[in-house]
Image (cartoon, helix red, strand yellow):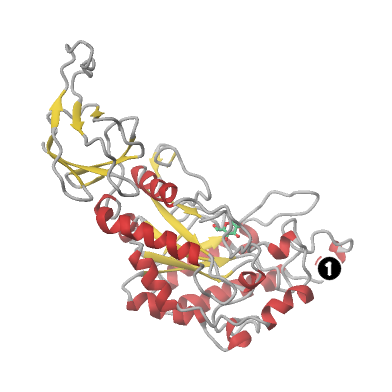
Amino acid sequence: MRQQWFDEARFGMFVHFGLYSTAARHEWVQNYERLTDAEYRQYFDHFDPDRFDARALARQAKRAGMRYVVLTTKHHEGFALWDSALTDFTSVTACGRDLVREYVDALRAEGLRVGFYHSVIDWHHPDFTIDWNHPRRGDDDIAAQNAGRDMGRYREFLHGQVRELLTGYGEIDYLFFDFTYPEPREGLAGKGPEDWAAAELLAMCRELQPNMLVNDRLGIPADFVTPEQYQPTSPLTRDGEPLVWEACQTMNGSWGYHRDNTDQKSVDLLVRMLADSVSMNGNMLLNIGPDGRGAIAPRDTAALDEIGEWMALHERAIVGAGHADFTPPREGVYTRGGDRLYLHLFTWPLGFVHLPGLAGKVGYARLLHDGSWLRTTAADPAQVADLMTPEGEPEGTLTVHLPVARPDVVLPVVELTLID
Ligand code: GLC
């Protein structure tokens, strides 16, 4: 029951915001450029999120049809977006603002579910040992540096900060831990569940927020799995059992604001990814990276507005919908909500779309965006192809007759009312 809202929501917003947003060249910039704390400090000293407007962000998510939002409370850089008593590396010390407080208040004002992202990695913390992901991984005295670091103290810090977040900001609906990398690489250690004391950390989450969903990135099983930056091709299962899953996706390949990145995905692709995920009983968490002043980038606003236009007409084919046990035609995918089957037409065919096994099972068909009726006919397998007559489709096929002109929506959807 913990996840019923999640299964229904289907669509959420990921928000990556931190000091890396002012560096404006990916949230891993400290790692990629092996920046020292001193080199990175300028982003803290000049952190001024004057255009971070949590209410506007919440309203943007709502307009896009998103039902929950997930904000980075702390990313690998170690910068806390809340008033943590355990470090002075926070948004309160940097600019006097508890951004997590502003965020949770804004989401609740808009009736959205509250999600936190929290990195178990912390490249700023003096006890976090240097490993193959650390910005100091190329130093020639790693062993000496690590000898002075105490992961036990870091675990206390990590658990203490999670406790602050789960006791200081009301009911939290969702927690996305990130991430575990147990395998050694290039002669350096990784970090596994034992480095986080993952079982104890998860137990604390359950104790403090019993209804909160927790993901799988502590390195131990929890409530849902998290494919990232790729699309599964069928409903996810483990040992034959269905998995609750959410694919997190970026607009352009970068989670944090990356000014010069022009790999922006088309809205057509993003909406197809959303429908595709729901057709496989998954959620999609679509990311935005607010810029160096905390504003949503215009390219992301434009995309979210266009997605919102589509969702305003097609929401019922996504929210509360899921996998349908019918074989879809080659032109698209099905989602199902109750007695409605939704055919998302990734390509627009000429005149007809043929639906295997649906003859006699559909009482009414229409285009969802404008509610316009569509003619349906059952296949006649005996029909022989002639000059202007196509060959009959297999027995049991339902043919839906379509207008030649593709509807002027990002992704046309045919709604079929199923009858017993
Ligand atoms: C990966 C990236 C991290 C990002 C996360 C989002 O773990 O390392 O930067 O926040 O994916 O799922």
- As drawn, the residue found furthest toward the bottom would be 96
Give the camera-side residue of 174 and 62.
Answer: 62
Using the image, determine if residue 325 lies above or below residue 216: above
Q: Which x, y percent locates residue 234?
A: 41, 38
Crowding at label 1, few (<14), some or many (≥20) Cα neighbours within 10 Å? Answer: some
Q: Quadrant of ligand 1?
A: bottom right
Let me know if residue 412 appears in the view.
Answer: yes
- Label 1 CB-ligand 1 distance < 8 A: no
Q: Amino acid at mark 1?
A: Gln
Q: Is residue 154 left or right of residue 411?
A: right
Residue at image location 44% in from the left, 37% down from the top: 233
Q: Is residue 277 left or right of residue 403?
A: right
Residue at image location 13% in from the left, 34% down from the top: 375
Give the camera-side residue of 322 and 303.
Answer: 303
Give the quadrant of the N terminus: bottom left
Residue at image location 20% in from the left, 24% down from the top: 397
Answer with the quarter of the image where residue 31 lies.
bottom right
Q: Is residue 141 left or right of residue 158?
A: right
Give the camera-side residue of 326 and 238.
Answer: 326
Let me know if residue 210 appears in the view.
Answer: no
Using the image, determine if residue 60 lies above or below residue 374: below
Using the image, determine if residue 408 lies above or below residue 191: above
Write down the residue under mark 1.
Answer: 145
- As drawn, the residue found furthest toward the right would be 140
Residue at image location 69% in from the left, 74% down from the top: 153
